Image: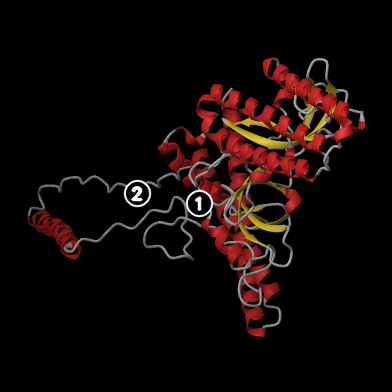
Amino acid sequence: MSVELLSLEVEQSKFQLEELEELASVAGDAADDLATVIADLRSLIALQEESLLAAKKAEPLTPVADTTTSANTNTSHEKDEDAVIIIDEKPSPPFPNNLKEGDKCCLPFPHNNYAYFLPSMILTLNLTQNEATVLPLTPITRQSRTCDRFLEGTCTKEDCGRSHGTAVSLAELLPMEVLDSGTMDRESKILALYKDGVYYPATIRATDAEKGDAFWVTYDGYGTDKVKLTSAEVLPIVGFTLDEEAVPGTVSSEGESDVSSDEGEEEAVVEDDDPPLISFQYDDGEAMGAWEAHTKGIGGRLLAKMGYRVGEGLGKSGEGIVRPVDATIVRPGAGLGHEELSGAKRKRKRHKDGNERRHKRQSTLSTINGGQDASNVFDFLNSSLNSDTPPPARPPPPSPKETPKTKPKPLDLNKQLLSVQERMSVLAQEQKRTKEGLQRNSGDKRMTEAYKEKQTTIEAQIAALRREEDRLSRQLKSTKQRKNMVVF
């Protein structure tokens, strides 16, 4: 490389250093973050100056006869120095002689109170106004992703949700060498590409020994699952010293950064450490264990860890039940196979002295009956001895009247009908499970006979309940018709 080009690069680097120092002076809290970038740029300037000095020493000496040429050269150098002084007085855009449309540069991209230096491409260049339209090549937000239709020239929407380029000043653009100061070692913080085309904060966990340009990374806040990425899919984070508690890119619910307070950092880490829920679905689309959405999802993670596959039964050969058993609540003391009728009265507890009370009641009744019999005998004797006086007329014993049967009320009929229907639904589920068990154990003769016998019993119970349902429906219908006939 010639001395002129090296000197031009040194001047450009010095100009960029001045711009960064001015930016750090007004940045406030972000000044510490830019300090590392400034130090790296100073190291780069020192290396460039050494290269320039070595190139000058390697140049052949100018002959004495060319005094005029050397004088002209000295004059030109003096003019260049004057030009540099003019640049210091009135800043101009960096490397104006080299920039052109399609070149790559480094763009400071603000996001969540951080300034990320992202590789970008210059779409349009306007040297008269010192502006350029830059397109980020490594988007870190969904809005900064490149619009494919815009590149093809077919996107007509001004706000399509994708990036059509960002208009920035040429003074804000930096060379790509700024990213060389970033580290890509183990446990380094980087930006890693995801499936949606966005770069997210991640950490390098290991480097592929066979391929030096491959890395095993984990996305910060999304568990410990490792993903293998190439060097083209990762980007070093330059100029930032990140702690485990404060990862750039994580935003709280109020839209502020998670590094606002120590308590917020601890809460954010606890929430990010929770792995996502694992859900399964059957072939018919029904979700398995939908109630896990209200829990921490330990059941789904255990099934996935044990190698569970949707559609296969439990057990060594996969012949177990496919769907979980529905949980039913029964009263205390009732077994799993207990079927309690709605409306059935519970038996009262017997007292320890229940027998004595019953005997006392019976003895009292017997005493009353005995006394009545004795009085009847004495009356007979008196009537026999005193035959002159006619016996008093005794009223005839009251004839027992038949108590009319109470007609059932519509409310009671509805309750009985609902109870029958609930029992039929329970038996239908039991019949379905029995059929599934019969299919699973088709090779076992003993189990097949047991399931067939159980299925026959369930079918008989369902048929009886259907007849009861029809009877209650007819009775309820007749009750409603009678009511309509009576009430006008």
Helix, strand or loop status at disc 1: loop
Local crowd size for mark 2, using a 10 Å CA cut-off: few (<14), some (14–19), many (≥20):
few
Question: Residue extending furthest right?
Answer: 153
Local crowd size for mark 1, using a 10 Å CA cut-off: few (<14), some (14–19), many (≥20):
few
In the rendered structure, find residue 296 and report the number of the disc placed on it.
1
The quarter of the rendered structure image containing the N terminus is top right
Q: Is residue 198 visible?
A: no
Pick the front one: 420 or 157? 157
Pick the front one: 278 or 468? 278
- Residue on which disc 2 sits: 400
Specify the amino acid type for callout 1: Lys
Q: Is residue 338 visible?
A: yes
Helix, strand or loop status at disc 2: loop
- Residue at the image position 7 percent from the left and 53 percent from the top: 386
- Residue at the image position 72 percent from the left and 58 percent from the top: 214
The quarter of the rendered structure image containing the C terminus is top right
Location of residue 331 with respect to 31 vertically, above or below: below
Q: Position of residue 289 (x, y in %)?
A: 58, 54
Q: CA distance from mark 2 to mark 1?
A: 71 Å
Residue 452 figure quarter:
bottom right
Which callout, 2 or 1, points at the residue further toward the start of the chain?
A: 1
Q: Nearer the viewer, mark 2 or mark 1?
A: 1
From the viewer's perspective, is 307 left or right of 138?
left
Q: Position of residue 314 (x, y in %)?
A: 61, 70
Residue 76 figure quarter:
top right
Q: Position of residue 202 (x, y in %)?
A: 61, 48
In the rendered structure, find residue 56 and report the number of the disc placed on it.
none
Question: Residue extending furthest front?
Answer: 65
- Residue at the image position 88 percent from the left and 31 percent from the top: 66
Q: Position of residue 12 (x, y in %)?
A: 73, 30
